[in-house]
Amino acid sequence: MQLAIHGHRGFEDDPLYKSRRTLHTGAGLLTDRQIDRLNQLFADEGHVEVEATWGVYQRMIAAYREEDRSRGREAMVKLINDFGTGVPKALVEVAKLGRTLKKRAADVLSYFDRPGTSNGPTEAINGRLEHLRGSAPGFRNLTNYFARSLLETGGFRPQLAPVARVGPSATFGP
């Protein structure tokens, strides 16, 4: 958005650049100074898309922060239905988000159905793979890369010695 409006990524004195952190804060946690900054930002007609996107973001945060998961799920279902279709053409990013939410609704809503869910384990494995990619570049053999990836993430347990079978068919000695 900053690039589209000003032709650059953001300078210290740009209002949108100054507000980037405030825009990621939940509405209930904003200070008076942050509220004033947002009001000044949203007063500019060039930031209508930012204001609409911020409103959607606040609704999503509210749904996830809802203590009663069933009410949070209802809020998220309503959000997905509201933004799945019928978004004005000017709000390109909101429309794209709406399509993605509609397509991935089951995944998004599963958070509310299963308490204690987290993507932490997935992120941990991704972090290990990123470390591997940075510390061992240049794999030419895809099989070696797969094996190394499995070793790095703990998904491959090499068997160093054959397992001895114990039972009627096992033979011991010469």
Image (cartoon, grey):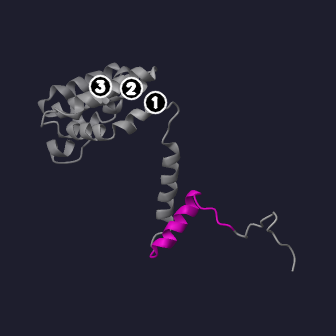
Q: Mark 1 points at which residue?
A: 113
The chief SS type of the magenta part is helix
- Nearer-N-terminus badge (3/2): 2
The quadrant the C terminus occupies is: bottom right
Instruction: Please tell me whether mark 2 sits on a helix, a strand or a loop.
Output: helix
- Residue shown at 37%/37% (left/top)? 106
Q: Residues within 10 Å of mark 1 (few under 14, many from 20)?
A: few
Circles 3, 1 touching at the beta carbon (< 8 Å): no
Residue 73 tag number: 2
* In magenta segment, residue 32: no
Instruction: Please tell me whether mark 3 sits on a helix, a strand or a loop.
Output: helix
Q: How crowded is mark 3: few (under 14 residues within 10 Å), some or many (20 or more)?
A: some
Q: As displayed, is residue 58 above or below residue 9?
A: above
* In magenta segment, residue 149: yes
Q: Is residue 98 left or right of residue 27?
A: left
Q: As displayed, is residue 66 above or below residue 127?
A: above
Asked if residue 14 can be seen in this view, the reply is no
Where is residue 20? Give x, y as percent. Answer: 30, 36
Where is residue 97? Give x, y as percent. Answer: 26, 39
- Nearer-N-terminus badge (3/1): 3
Q: Is residue 15 left or right of residue 154?
A: left
- Residue shown at 63%/62% (left/top)? 157
Circles 1, 2 touching at the beta carbon (< 8 Å): yes
Where is residue 55? Give x, y as percent. Answer: 26, 27
Distance between the Cα atoms at labels 3 and 1? 16 Å
- Residue shown at 44%/33% (left/top)? 111
Q: Give the magenta-colored segment's residue range.
A: 140-159
Residue 38 tag number: none
- Nearer-N-terminus badge (1/2): 2
Q: Name the residue under label 3.
A: 78
